[in-house]
Image: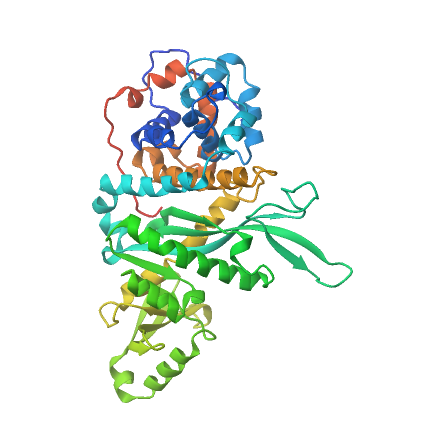
Amino acid sequence: MISDRNISQQIENTHSNEDFAVSKFIRFLKHIGLKKMLTQIPDHRQESKKRYSNDSLLIWALSVFFFRQESKNSLNTTISDLPIYKQNSFLNYLGIQEGSLPRRDCVDDYLASVDGETINELLMKIFHWAKQNKIFYNHAESLLPNNYFHLGIDGFWVHRYFKPHATNEHGENICPYCLPRVHNKGKPEEKTDWLHAFVTFVLIFPGGFQFPIYVYPLKASQVDVTASDEKLKQECELLGAHKVLPELRKKMGRIAITVLLDSLYANEPMFILLESLNLNFLIVRQEETFKSIGYKCNEFDTSELYQKHYRDQERRDLPGNKIMERRVKWYNNVACGKESSVNVLRFSEVTKNANGVVIKEFHTEWLGKTAINKRNWHSLVERGRMRGDHEDTHNSLKNRGFAARHDYARSNPNLCLNWKLLMFLAMLIFELFSFTTIAKEARGKRSWMKFARDLLQQLVEIKWEAISYSSILRKAKIQFRFDFAPE
């Protein structure tokens, strides 16, 4: 909802050429060619029902997430309650020249007919747009450690239903995406709830830049729904990885990619898959996974050769008289099954206060494709630790205004899926915008969530004549500069 406070300055002079923050955002959407991309999504509505173009309806839906409204009801109420003259700016923003604003039911009717895969494909189209515009090339030093893209894969539980949300005439669940979870089975208090789960594929860059590139929705027919939550999550992630990675490799071309994975993926079938796709990898190995690798490395540790030439350590002074101590060991070409071998990097980092008391410690082990030595272990460590930023993508979707847990469409499974896919698309577009120098300057000291909500406030408070007359919207060409330095 729009807050009650006024915009700092109401624009009455329609000949003002001030560049409002919302003008900059609108120009960015034009810059990436969003309207053209959206018009390519098939429109299966009857001609008599096409009151609004599909791109206008899709931008309406994306705006729920662009402006962090947390529900379509919130956006619908906000714009519907406005006087007609204030609705005019939102109409123009949607590309509707005259008439009334679309209602949420109208948006839902269209979205329910859309094949979700066409929304998913837009993530890849934006990747190729960024690649063609040399965003990665021009910022390779900041974005591509060792000239590699880094891809994370992780499971994401997006919604839990406590009763079937889509049923047949007998009250039975018919949603293909619902994964049933039975609690206290066989007991009087037995109950069932249903999960919706995705496997997300996200390009991870240093400095906090995250680029969702594919979202794989799980169906109950694909997995063992009787398994525990942990086992189910593992099965979902492995299934998604084996199905999606070959297709992603084809669509992304021959670029150098390192896949960052947790210990679930430390198995020979995954090594073979990654090798066959010419994908580099850094996979966490925990003590209880692939134990034979641990045994072999422990044996190597007993030899004088490894003790002398295959380990390193360093000490760093930190602010506040703290000390960080790092120790590494590495083992190259360790056999891990009949057909595969990996290189193993064991890493330990301990931080002590001025009194020598340990206040923080981190220990892990990575399995990788790259041979390890004294010159490259620092880089491998930093790249391996980037995997944690994938979880921040999910945190943003849950807690920073995108409301991933919200039920955007209860009774229609396809509609429910499409709203969630649009959430990822909106996050990606806003993420790109947030790394432009124009957006950073316009945001000031506000959080990105507050800034996003203020964009909507500007859109409905400032006359369209003033917004459209902004110099950034009147110029034929605009060069958006990107700044990927961490804040």
Q: Is residue 142 above or below residue 466?
A: below
Coloring applied to the structure? rainbow
Residue nearest the observer in this picture, 18 or 232: 232
Q: Residue at x 24, y 22 (%)?
A: 476
Using residue 139 as the reference point, say whether residue 288 is left or right of it: right
Which quadrant holds residue 92?
A: top left
Q: Residue at x 43, y 78 (%)?
A: 291
Residue nearest the observer in this picture, 183 or 349: 183
Using residue 123 as the reference point, say whether residue 61 is left or right of it: right
Which quadrant holds residue 458?
A: top left
Residue nearest the observer in this picture, 118 or 395: 118
The x, y position of residue 470, in whole percent, is 32, 19
- Residue 195 is at least partly visible in this image: yes
Residue nearest the observer in this picture, 287 or 121: 121
The x, y position of residue 335, in whole percent, is 32, 78
**Which quadrant is home to the N terminus?**
top right
